[in-house]
Amino acid sequence: MLYKKILQWLFLSSILSSALLSAEKVNKEDQPADIDFIRFNETEFKAALETASAKYINDDGVEVELIGAVHIADKEYYQDLNTQFEKYDSLLYEMVGGDPDKPLTKEDLAANKKNPMRFFQLLIGGMMKLDFQLDHIDYTAKNFIHADMTMETFQKRQKAKGENLFSLIEKSIEAQENAQSQNKKQFNFASMFKLLNDEGGPNGMKLALGRQFHEIESMIGGMEGPDGSVIVAERNVTALKVMEKEIKKGKKNLGIFYGAAHLPDFDKRLIEEYGFKRTEKTWNPAWKIQKAAAKKALKESI
């Protein structure tokens, strides 16, 4: 149990600012496929973690695309996103802190890496041989618009709601354990260690985390709660206010680049509060995993 909690804590610490999964507490089998914004596909020879890009349009012809983010991923994932971002009039991005009234600089990015949250993201990324988002996304692009809380506002709102990183993580783990108890599911240490051994450390970790997404969903749901957290729901409201300003400036083609955990709430607000209609969705591979079985088959064919 202690090992499992350590693994969960490290993983959640690395992803809470844009979490990997749904911010709503739902059962996977009850969740319509069209509101999934992250998925893990696995076959005998390979597996992949994929994030969604979903398009929306309103009656005035304004198009908004939600682009799910993963903070640690393959370098190619970020390179493809940089190319995708070039097509938007405005690309709204998440990043607590910074000055929303001036463009982000390379110095700002370097300072942001010193954030304690980034330490855990870099730690997990190194363990799984994945690259870090801030090292590859071009935040200095001219169409990039900061659409997040300032650090001062974020801290004030968290204090008002009694939130902090550790309380959210503990709350999430407690919710996951309650869900696990109700479902009579047990964490299998033997299977975990066998997977790490058979696949190798980095691939084993990716596969183990991918296969546990149903548990992590309940953890994120427990963190968010019925009233929404500052770290997800309130930051989404902030981003959508920036979207309103950009639309008033005449922008017709906008992208919102936020963690995949934010997208279900964005989806709901765009449709119910802003009158947008969802039109299509594509998938971006963030982790590409070649399994040990594929490597073995390749060797045997030579």
Image: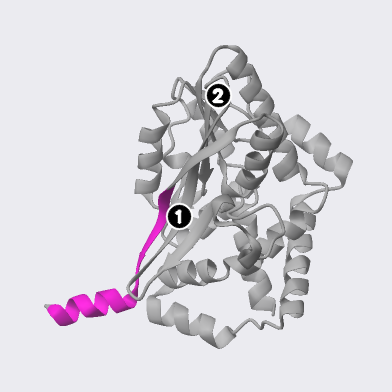
Residue 42 drawn above or below residue 167 = below
Residue 109 drawn above or below residue 12 = above
Residue at 44% across / 37% down in the picture? 137
Q: Is residue 287 on the magenta stretch? A: yes
Image quarter of residue 240: top right
Quarter holding the C terminus is bottom left
Q: What residue is disc 2 on? A: 145
**Within 10 angstroms of label 1, few (less than 14), some, or many (20 or more) residues?**
many
Q: Which mark is residue 155?
A: none
Q: Which residues are magenta?
A: 283-301
Q: Work out whether residue 6 or residue 194 is closer to the camera in this orientation and state it.
A: 194
Report x, y in % for residue 198: 39, 82
Quarter holding the N terminus is bottom right
Q: Is residue 193 on the magenta stretch? A: no
- The answer for how far apart the CA atoms under marks 1 and 2 are is 25 Å
Q: What residue is disc 1 on? A: 50
Asked whether residue 99 appears in the rendered view, the answer is: no
Which residue in the rendered view is the most extreme toward the left?
302
Report x, y in % for residue 123: 53, 57
Three-letter residue code for mark 1: Glu
Asked if residue 4 lies left or right of residue 73, the reply is right
Asked if residue 221 lies left or right of residue 299, the reply is right
Judging from the image, what secondary structure is the residue with disc 1 in? Answer: strand
Which residue in the rendered view is the most extreme toward the top?
249
**Within 10 angstroms of label 2, few (less than 14), some, or many (20 or more) residues?**
many
